[in-house]
Each structure stands twice: as structure tokens, then as C-alpha cells.
Image (spheres, rainbow, N blue to C red):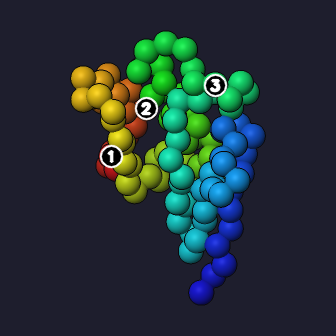
Amino acid sequence: MSAKRAVFTDKAPAPLPVFSQAIVHNGIVYCSGQVGTDPATRELVEGTVKDRTAQIFRNITAVLEAAGSSLEKLLKVNIFLTNMDDFAAVNDVYAQVLNFEPKP
């Protein structure tokens, strides 16, 4: 059984001390959850839900790259919304960012 390793990059928001940005185990990257926080300011980005969703994908991209992976290798994506009125806006960004096949 291969060892697992934690992933850290300063190009994504720093995790709380009890989390890693991601774990790599047996060649698979397991990313922790992300929110629309700017890693430089540690503040939620200004703007719309689309702006925040785009920031989330920038954060995920940075973590995946630090792990030696990419969005194109995603196997699964979980998105949690607090307001279903935001579904279409989030879906728009998802479709723009994950513009390859097969989609996760």
C-alpha cells in the first residue's frame, strides 16, 4: 500500500489546521472543499455567484496542479448550494470551465 501525501499551494486559500487542501493516495487526488475565497486576501471575492464559482474553480485548479493533476482528470465533483436560485449561474460556470469530455 502506498503512502498518502498532503498537498499544499499558496495559490489557493490556506486550509484550516485540521484539513489539507488535498491528499494524494495511489495516484488519485482527493481535493478538500473550496469556497470562493481569494488566496491573496483570504476574503470571499466580490461580485456575483458566478464570480465566486469561477474563483472556486481557480482554487481547485491550483490545488490539482500542485498535486501534479488537472481539471481534465476529475472523476467527481460535488457542489453544495445554499440557494437553488443560484443553480443556473453555477451550472454556467461549470460548463465553461469543464468544457471537455467526458465530464465528471
Q: Splitting the image into 4 quarters, where does residue 79 fall? A: top left
Q: Earlier in the sequence, mark 2 or mark 3?
A: 3
Mark 1 lies on a secondary structure that is loop
Looking at the image, which residue sits at the far bottom? 1
Q: Are marks 3 and 1 in contact (CB under 8 Å)?
A: no
Q: Which residue has dot 3 on it? A: 43
Distance in Å between CA atoms under marks 2 and 3: 22 Å
Residue 41 position within the rendered picture, expressed as x and y whole percent measured from the top left = 71, 24
Q: Would residue 6 appear left or right of 69 to someone viewing this image?
A: right
Vertical order, 12 against 40 (above or below): below
Q: Residue at x 65, y 57 (%)?
A: 18
Judging from the image, what secondary structure is the residue with disc 2 in?
helix
Q: Is residue 74 left or right of residue 40?
A: left
The residue lying at 66 percent from left, 78 percent from top is 3
Picture residue at 59% right of the left edge, 30% below the top: 37
Whole-percent x, y for residue 32 in the image: 54, 52
- What residue would you read off at disc 1? 103
Residue type pointed to by label 3: Glu
CA gap, disc 3 to disc 1?
30 Å
- Location of residue 103 in the rendering, given as x and y in whole percent from the top left corner: 33, 46
The 10 Å Cα crowd at callout 2, few under 14, some 14 to 19, many 20 or more, is: some
Circle count: 3
- Residue 97 is labelled as 2
Label 1, residues with CA under 10 Å away: few <14, some 14-19, many ≥20? some
Q: Please state which of residues 22 and 82 is positioned toward the viewer in this rendering.
A: 82
As drawn, 14 above or below 40: below
The mark found on residue 23 in the picture is none
